[in-house]
Image (cartoon, helix red, strand yellow):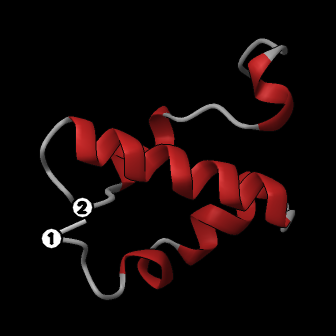
Amino acid sequence: MRKLSKDVLTRHAQYLHDRTGGYFLYLSQLICGAAVAAILDGTEDVTLEHLQAIRIGREEILPSR
């Protein structure tokens, strides 16, 4: 990614932890999915909106809360 903010993950650390429950597999899925979305939409930077748009783990099969 060409325009990735230096502190993008630390800026959203609490959100990432809350969302993944601290599970590295879910964290990896979330970050990778958001990165792919950022590349595809041309922004080349992961935003909170990118992170919120990605479904991880059991979210794929369970309805949203």
Which of the 4 image quarters holds residue 44? bottom left
Q: In this rendered view, identify the residue nearer to me: 24 or 64.
A: 24
Q: Which residue is mark 1?
A: 3
Say whether marks 1 and 2 touch (CB < 8 Å): yes
Residue 62 is left or right of residue 15, and the answer is right
Q: Residues within 10 Å of mark 1 (few under 14, many from 20)?
A: few
- Looking at the image, which residue is at 49% across and 84% down? 10
- Amino acid type at circle 2 is Asp
* Residue 51 badge: none
SS state under label 1:
loop
- Looking at the image, which residue is at 35% across and 86% down? 7
Q: Position of residue 64 (x, y in %)?
A: 71, 19
Q: Position of residue 34 (x, y in %)?
A: 44, 48
- Amino acid type at circle 1 is Lys
Q: Which residue is mark 2?
A: 45
Q: CA distance from mark 1 to mark 2?
A: 5 Å
* Of the image marks 1 and 2, the number of the one nearer the N terminus: 1
Q: Residues within 10 Å of mark 2 (few under 14, many from 20)?
A: many
Q: Please, is residue 62 above or below residue 43 in the view?
A: above
